[in-house]
Image (cartoon, rainbow, N blue to C red):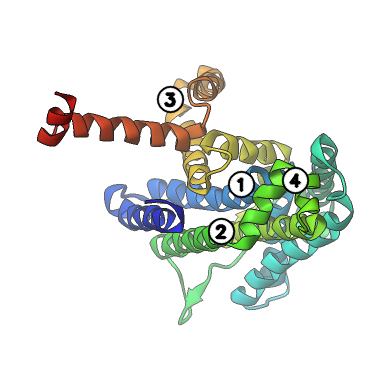
Amino acid sequence: MGGFRADALRLCALAAALALAPLVLSGGYHLTVLTMCCLHAMIAVGLNLLVGHAGQISLGHAGFYGLGAYTTAVLTATLGLPVPLGMAAGVLAAAAVAFLVGVPSLKLTGHYLAMATLGFGIILSILFNETVAITGGPSGFTGIPRPAVAGAPLGDLAYYFIVAGSLCLVLLLSLNLLHSRLGRALRALHTSEKAAQAMGIDVARHKLFVFVLSAGFAGLAGVLYAHYLTFIAPASFGFSFSVELIVMVVLGGMTSLLGSVLGAFFLTVLPEFLRVFENVEVLLFGLILVLCMLYLPGGLAGGLAALTERLSRTTKRRTPSGEAADG
């Protein structure tokens, strides 16, 4: 079984795991880590569409994440707009700015495009820090309201289910896209832009579309992040987080959306486990990443697929029919 049906089954398994996770991992700390995992996975899925399938490198996605967060923060906390309107505006702002940036920068290729997006991310980071009257500067922005039902702010558990549900919707939309004609065009574009153009694919339009969509996912994660913590600061949207997002995609598996989710969960949870090692925490983190890259060339998704295949072969050998075939 392959194609969209297999991906849909994997998505259902992931949705069930996310729904059951709070029952196993009780406590506010575990719920916060789970929520952050889902937020990071949302951005990684969008970045996987851009990097893994369309072959375009972006080092500025933390900027779109921050743009969504600051837009909804200013609109709801400073100007008093309803939270749903602020959240919608945050996603639209990230997508609109991505469109404006994408039109000129997507004419570049390879590391030139990476440098252009890197520059854009740095500009946004400086704006978040320097426009103190609007964003609160390095001290951060406080007082962002939680979404409320009948006047009562949502609790952490209810908010977690909103974030997890949003991640599943993002994945469903992305899987549908990849199994459509547009997805095939993106893969052709990744292989060779010239060959894709010769086949009649509008390269510029497809690159711009996936760039804006990817930024929209980052903006969605940003607005959910802002209203979850009710506090944001520029340090969360800097260059280092953009690099971390790329590592999530590469570590998870460049051509696997669900692999990006694995990569995001792994890199979000790993530092929490390594906190007990204090002084050597960073060294261990780097060492684990190097080992993963060396022994899992297909990423976590490739390693999981290889393990599943090996277990399947072992099971077949142990069944009577398998033993008869072997004999």
Q: Are marks 1 and 2 in contact (CB under 8 Å)?
A: yes
**Is any part of residue 222 visible from this angle?**
no
Query: Where does label 4 land, which residue?
Result: 60
Where does residue 252 sit, x and y in percent of width and height? 52, 38
Q: Which residue is mark 1?
A: 48
Q: Nearer the viewer, mark 3 or mark 2?
A: 2
Q: Residues within 10 Å of mark 4 (few under 14, many from 20)?
A: many
Q: Residues within 10 Å of mark 3 (few under 14, many from 20)?
A: few
The extreme left residue here reads 320
Report whether 144 appears left or right of 200. Answer: left
Three-letter code for the amino acid on which mark 4 is drawn = Gly
Marks 4 and 1, the one that precedes in the sequence: 1
The mark found on residue 174 in the picture is: 2
Q: CA distance from mark 1 to mark 2?
A: 10 Å
Disc number for residue 276:
3
Disc 4/disc 1 C-alpha distance (Å) = 14 Å
Q: Amino acid at mark 3?
A: Val
> Could you tell me residue 242's position as x and y percent?
69, 41
**Secondary structure beneath label 1:** helix
Q: Quarter of the image holding residue 310?
A: top left
> How many angstroms separate mark 3 from mark 4 (CA)?
31 Å
Nearer the observer, disc 3 or disc 1? 1
Task: Describe the element under mark 4 as helix, strand or loop.
Answer: loop
Sequence-wise, the earlier of marks 3 and 1 is: 1
* View extreme (bottom): residue: 150
Disc 2 element: helix
Residue beneath the point at 72% across and 54% down: 64
Identify which amino acid the numbered label 2 is placed on: Ser
- Considering the numbered disc 3 on the image, is that residue within a helix, a strand or a loop? helix
